[in-house]
Image: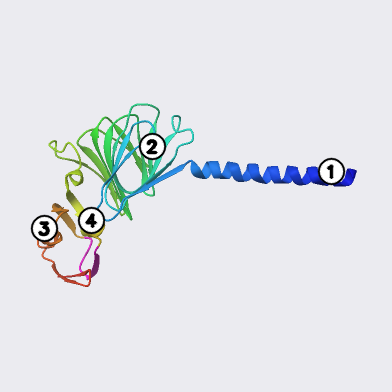
């Protein structure tokens, strides 16, 4: 009887340990919060401190709500506009670099080989490829394929134009413009016959695909044909 009782106690302790382990892991997993927008969609996310994030099309953020007040960190893949409430340090982490603020408004666009941060209010610290920049309203910094530049925005721009249904570009590689078209209209491109590294300055509207294509490709003398939800580009 004594041996059986001890064995039962050991089994009970083991079961309790397993339950505790699973409970801790479930709690940690449940602390992760994830938001993702679809093609052609904008999504507004209100964070735990009241800060607001507006996701552009096909963009994603995630954060851990555990200890949020002391460690405000958001992971971004894609493009988003941030309105940060004052408080502890707020950090946006992307595969291309980080952005750190206390309370301000700024836009971050992070895609493959492209990282662009623009400040609309307050002051923003940007770190990319071990380089650090401090930007203020109407200032921006961009890392395109390892080439980092600082530039000025129009003082008339109070918010990113994509919030108003129009994507605007200032000396941006055509590949990024094509990627933006894909995210807004969910349509693929065949680009093997063109140079996607040429720079584009201009804009396109999010409501009409035909008008958007004409706005972009007629400006750079590129022809396009549409077939089976795929656009073939040629010089």
Q: Nearer the viewer, mark 2 or mark 4?
A: 4
Q: Which mark is residue 6?
A: 1
Q: Is residue 50 above or below residue 182?
A: above
Residue, disc 4: 184
Contact? badges 3 and 2 (CB < 8 Å): no
Q: Which residues are magenta?
A: 187-197
Looking at the rendered structure, the secondary structure element under dot 4 is helix
Task: For marks 4 and 1, give the CA distance.
Answer: 65 Å
Q: Nearer the viewer, residue 138 or 42?
A: 42
Label 2 sits on residue: 91
**SS class of the residue under badge 2?**
strand
Q: Residue placed at 44% from the left, 33% from the top?
A: 68
Residue at 24% over, 69% down: 190
Can you tell which mark lies on residue 215? Answer: 3
Image label count: 4
Viewer-proximal residue among 9 and 59: 9
Pick whichever, 26 or 118, lies toward us.
26
- Whole-angstrom CA distance, mark 3 to mark 2, is 35 Å
Q: Is residue 86 above or below residue 111?
A: above
Which of pointers 1 and 2 lies earlier in the amino acid sequence? Answer: 1
- The residue drawn where x is 48% and y is 40% is 31
The nearer-to-camera label among 4 and 1 is 1
**Considering the numbered disc 1 on the image, is that residue within a helix, a strand or a loop?**
helix
């Amino acid at each position: 009887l004594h041996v059986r009782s001890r064995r039962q106690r050991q089994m009970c302790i083991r079961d309790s340990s397993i339950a505790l382990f699973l409970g801790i892991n479930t709690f940690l997993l449940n602390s992760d919060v994830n938001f993702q927008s679809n093609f052609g969609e904008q999504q507004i996310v209100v964070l735990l401190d009241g800060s607001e994030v507006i996701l552009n099309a096909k963009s994603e953020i995630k954060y851990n709500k555990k200890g949020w007040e002391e460690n405000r960190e958001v992971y971004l893949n894609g493009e988003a506009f941030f309105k940060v409430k004052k408080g502890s340090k707020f950090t946006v982490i992307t595969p291309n670099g980080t952005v750190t603020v206390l309370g301000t408004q700024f836009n971050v666009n992070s895609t493959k080989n492209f990282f662009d941060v623009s400040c609309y209010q307050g002051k923003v610290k940007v770190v990319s490829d071990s380089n650090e920049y401090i930007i203020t309203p109407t200032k921006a910094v961009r890392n395109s394929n390892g080439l980092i530049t600082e530039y000025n925005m129009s003082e008339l721009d109070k918010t990113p134009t994509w919030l108003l249904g129009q994507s605007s570009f200032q000396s941006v590689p055509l590949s990024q413009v094509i990627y933006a078209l894909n995210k807004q209209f969910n349509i693929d491109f065949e680009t093997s016959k063109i140079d996607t590294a040429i720079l584009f300055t201009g804009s396109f509207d999010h409501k009409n695909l035909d008008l958007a294509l004409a706005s972009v490709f007629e400006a750079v003398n590129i022809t396009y044909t549409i077939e089976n939800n795929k656009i073939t580009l040629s010089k």
